[in-house]
Image: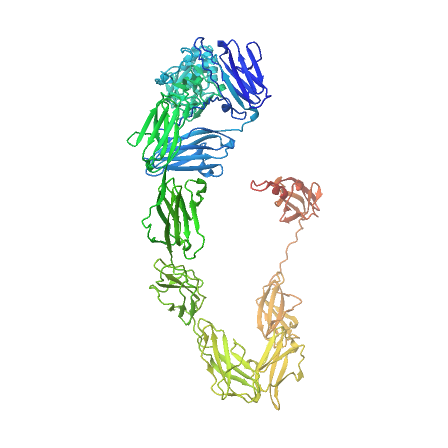
Amino acid sequence: NTAVFEAETEKSGIKVKWQRAGTEITESEKYVIKTEGNKHSLTINNVGKEDDVTYAVIAGSSKVKFELKVKEPGTAFSEQFRFHHYFQSHMPPSRIKSMEIISSAETQPEPPLDPIGLFVARPQDGEVTVGGNITFTAKVAGESLLKKPSVKWFKGKWMDLASKVGQHLQLHDSYDRNTKVYTFEMEIIEANMTFAGGYRCEVSTKDKFDSSSFNLTVNGKVDSSHLFFFSFSCPCIFFPGHDDGAEFNFSSLLKKRGEGKSESQSDVDVWDILRKAPPTEYEKIAFQYGITDLRGMLKRLKRIKKEEKKSTAFLKKLDPAYQVDKGQKIKLMVEVANPDADVKWLKNGQEIQVSGRYIFESVGNKRILTINHCSLADDAAYECVVGDEKSFTELFVKEPPILITHPLEDQMVMVGERVEFECEVSEEGATVKWEKDGIELTREETFKYRFKKDGKKQYLIINESTKEDSGHYTVKTNGGVSVAELIVQEKKLEVYQSIADLTVKARDQAVFKCEVSDENVKGIWLKNGKEVIPDERIKISHIGRIHKLTIEDVTPEDEADYSFIPQGFAYNLSAKLQFLEPPKIHLDCLGQSPDTIVVVAGNKLRLDVPVSGDPTPTVIWQKVNKAVPGTTCNDFILHFHCPQLLFESEGRVRVEMHEDHCVFIIEGAEKEDEGVYRVILKNPVGEDKADITVKVIDVPDPPEAPTISNIGEDYCTVHWQPPKYDGGQPVLGYILERKKKKSYRWMRLNFDLLKELTYEAKRMIEGVVYEMRIYAVNSIGMSRPSPASQPFMPIAPPSEPTHFTVEDVSDSTVSLKWRPPERIGAGGLDGYMLEYCKDGSTEWIPALPGLTERTSALIKDLVTGDKLYFRIKAVNLAGESGAATIKEPVTVQEILQRPKFWLPRHLRQTLVKKVGETVNIVIPFQGKPRPKITWLKDGQTLDSKDVGIRNSSTDTILFIRKAELHHSGAYEVTLQIENMSDKVAITIQIIDKPGPPQNIKLVDVWGFNAALEWTPPQDDGNAQILGYTVQKADKKTMEWYTVFDHYRRTNCIVSDLIMGNEYFFRVFSENLCGLSETAATTKNPAYIQKTGTTYKPPCYKEHDFSEAPKFTHPLVNRSVIAGYNTTLSCAVRGIPKPKIFWFKNKMDLSGDAKYRMFSKQGVLTLEIRKPSPFDGGIYTCKAVNECGEAEIECRLDVRGKQLNPMDNPNTAMRRE
């Protein structure tokens, strides 16, 4: 026969290539290729069995594959069928290579309910193009749940999508009260390529948990130049065993196959199997028995096959190989010829040490190695070494076979549906093989099949099934096999008239009608997924091709989704019955004056309003301000059936809609929320409304700050006003609190509520600053505190001043004085207020502007001859004290007073001062009017440049800043008032240290005594000489010792001198200022001769101790760190003392300030200050004297600083 394949591109002029089994087809007699505009065809003549292969057509970057099935002749299926396929060049390969059969008369059935776990329906895999929207739905049965289950959506393993909700992702949930099913939806908006991948939905309740995984495939946008429409005409496809045009009954093909249960394999020696098997079977054996390192095992096999020489050290060697199961124990044993021989055990060439897993035993000639709990790490080459001979073996650790714990299940799907085979194996990540009808499915066919691993689960996925996918699918492991059958059905049923949505009113009749192409097809009617049972009101009829469902006297319970499902076909004809009911608000107070709903401010108001109506009415909430007619209302409108307007359901004041009621909520009620609220229900049938009054009561507003008056020593009076707003309830009373200004602790003053607006606060501490505040209280509670009052201090005024007297009176002034009051108090003393009153008057006139802080005052500009009374008051924060008054009036008139000096006692004798001291003489006097004062010295007027004179009305002062000897003498001061006078004389003596005695001489020396004499000093320092101090000193030490002090004569005898010593003597003079600064000293010493025979010492020849320089301690080579001072030391001797020179690299260092040289007791030291690497080199020390010279040298190395790891290297380099 001839097969024709046709393809149609979106545009004409596109070059198309055809391929057969991956090889491009060239035009020939067998293959005819035609192109007409945008239509392309491939004709295969003389079809044979060899043409049963995979073909492909390529346009640009787009490619689609298809198959040609060739059956035995004579059973051809005459009906021609066409494959329509759209695909896009930028889709993933799995999508490009998939094939989809589309039938306009067939719809996809709903996913089956999940009878296991919490899910009623699990979210299914989905595909979406870039920029498109897709919704995944999960349904959970809520009939047995006490509360709403918790659902989480994840992408991948860990990404919780709850935190990603926004522009591209929305999560929704709802609850159907009729079916008691929770529906959870994840909506992806404007998808892009990054959204593709695996997703997971997790649902959990108090004691249950379930999860479901699904995938999202995001396809790129369609390139119109590469878009295909395929039409395949295949008259040569045959199905053996059926007549032409025969009808297939796919249900007869369904059968349940017994699952092939994996049986545990018997304990076999894999090593033995490998040695006997041909090389072509190695890979098959490795897969069957779970060998992971086949290449290494074959290397060992080749090594073992070599012939071994006969051994002299071993009676019995190790076997060529051992095999042990993972986790088991094995013993390796050899027999040695010498029972005393020592053996070594090696693993991969490394000696094995004794441990808990490796145990060595020696029993006679036997040497045993025991390995406990074998793991894959023990799969290695082992050796036993005796002397120079070795015994070699291989240990293979066999993993347990991979078992199929959950087998495959048979599946029956319709053409185009997704197929997913799932099995579970005993280990994660295990390798399995998938086969279809005995042919292995490879990765090269990923355009049709997709393999997936998820832990222990293995998946084979066929995204879009075709009839050619029917067959038996097998999954194989090295420990088991599981087989399942896939049946792909194709049925066609045309629907001439589908059922339509109905909208009816109460008591009306509802009729659902549909018409299908086959009058013999029966079906069932469903209401919300449950089969409809006919009764007196509900009738079901089937006449020919027409199916009817009639409902009489429709009630609200009849509103539901109705479906008609033809038996044997994957069709679901659905429609909705909508019941119309006028809206109704069900409140007890309707038709009456609504009761006032009282809510406390800050509390939550929740008002449940039962409503009814079908379709669901629109709810409008209004706040009506009845106090001001004509004002606009504030509307809270919620369209229950328009999700885009649900923003009104958020916020502090909001409305929530439920199936049979709406809830008006005010979170944290405020005063502004008070008023009349109107709820209006509207739907197409009618309208209803009701008014609800809400009153908000609250605690009162805080009163204004209280005022303080009548402040006393420990009390005050507090006044306040009522609050402006009483909170809707009458004020019951007030609470008063006080605190210290610098404190944070308020103290309550009353425990019973104060009914009045004034209160006298007592028991306060004088001098402490206080503040007051007030609370208002009503039946709801206590208001916030008022602002604090102005700070105040409880204080009392001071007592009156004391000793208020007149000090002086002149023709226009009066001088007054007083003492501070006895009690001042905590308020302190701000000052004194002085007043006077004329004799015969009662008006007191301030004597001074303002207050004075002094305790005396001079009142000026008074009228001569006036008689005045004077009084004084002390003033502080609390006010004025009582007045202290002079009882008798004071006449403003000058009083004549005789001049007189009041000479202090210490000035009545000579005033003695030392040179350089300050002289300050103060002489008080009296006399009025102010007298004239005159100072004289020795009858002469004083020089004002040398001596300072200061006079006042009450005293005179003589001041000498720095006394000199010429300031000594008799001073006279005279006080003159008209013809009256007074004078006093003062003697001042300025003294200084005396000069040394004169003419000191040694008069006589005898025995242990020496006689001295001298004359008094020429300068006695203007003071009497009080005595002399005599001292002696041994000529050898010249240390002076006092012999006499305060000695008054001018001659003396010094005794108790030591025989054989020579002495000098000196004498100091002394007056009131102290000892003279210098002393008179004898010119010649006094020699105390020894008594008896005079010893003549022998005469010796003087010894020559001269010696050339010699180093007794050498210089030592040193290595130091740069930047730290260092020293070089050595020791030298020589007589006379040698002269020392230091050199660096033969250069003299004498003039370099960087180096310091020291020499102490023959130890020579050279100090180098902060050396740098430049200071390294050869240092030489040279010693020279009259007898010769010597030198010594050493090497000094200066290293750079070591960098601290915590330092910055750049900083360290700069430092260096």
In percent of width and height, residue 407 lies at 37, 21
Please state the horizontal and vertical placement of residue 489, each as a whole percent of the image.
41, 19
486 horizontally vs 221: left or right: left
Check the image and name the residue furthest to the bottom: 979
Q: Position of residue 1154 (x, y in %)?
A: 67, 47
| Total residue callouts | 0
Tell me the quarter of the picture where residue 1047 sits.
Answer: bottom right
* Foreground of the two, 312 or 901: 901
Rendered view: 347 above or below 528: above
1088 and 382: which one is in front?
A: 382
Vertical position of residue 69 compared to residue 699: above or below: above
Pick whichever, 422 or 653, lies toward us: 653
The image quarter in which residue 568 lies: top left
- Whether residue 517 is situated above or below residue 947 in the rendered picture: above
In this view, 157 is above or below 336: below
Q: Nearer the viewer, residue 700 or 44?
A: 44
| Residue 564 as seen in the image, left or right of residue 807 | left
- Does the rendering let one see residue 394? no
Apparent side of residue 819 relative to residue 1140 in the rendered image (left or right): left
The quadrant of the picture occupied by the C terminus is top right
In the rendered structure, the answer to whether residue 565 lies left or right of residue 85 reads left
Percent across and percent down for residue 700 are: 39, 60
